[in-house]
Image (cartoon, rainbow, N blue to C red):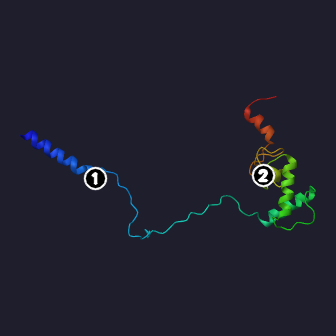
Amino acid sequence: MKFRTGLTIAFAAVIAAVPALASRVHRAPTSGHLHVSHHPVVVKSKKLHGQQVIDSDRVTAIQQALIREHYLTGGPTAKWDSDTQAAMLKFQADQGWQTKLTPDSRALIKLGLGPDHSGAINATGSTFNTVGNPTAIPQSQGFLAASGVSH
């Protein structure tokens, strides 16, 4: 008898649980009213990365270099205008470089507008820091002396 009671309780529990596990189907409202959400709509904007505008001093330097190389005529205007862009595109194309992004870093270096590495430790003719060290020697000799190799 206890077996039947336990079986009956288990069966009743299964029957009670089945509707809770059934899939719920969303049905359109039949009253003709539209569903209105009271949550604010969040619009995500496209985030721009990197430099967006070229500084006017930099534009002037680029224009002067393009004029010097005969890719641009007239005087520098300090504005990154369509003539300057076209001149830079032509310069980059003539070098065999990409033309989708201007100015290209290689083009700036070729125009003499790249970073100045003359003070770098491995630059030709540089010496190690001589401040407070009157016995400092040129870099090439310093490497030989540090290596312990004599020639």
In the displayed structure, does residue 103 sit left or right of residue 44? right
Q: Residue at x 77, y 39 (%)?
A: 142
Q: Which residue is the site of mark 2?
A: 105
- Determine the secondary structure under disc 1: helix
Residue 112 visible in the snapshot: no
**Distance CA(mark 2)–CA(mark 1):** 64 Å
Vertical relation: 39 (above or below) 106: below
Give the residue furthest to the left: 1
Crowding at dot 2, Cα within 10 Å, few <14 / some 14-19 / many 20+, comes out as: few
Specify the amino acid type for callout 1: Ala
Horizontal and vertical percent position of residue 146? 73, 35
Whichever of labels 2 and 1 marks the residue nearer the N terminus, that label is 1
Horizontal and vertical percent position of residue 101? 76, 54
Q: Residue at x 74, y 64 (%)?
A: 53
Q: Quick one: quadrant of the C terminus? A: top right
Q: Residue at x 41, y 63 (%)?
A: 28
Disc 2 and disc 1 in contact, CB within 8 angstroms: no
Residue 20 numbered mark, or none: 1
Can you tell which of label 2 and label 1 is closer to the viewer?
A: 1
Horizontal and vertical percent position of residue 56? 79, 66
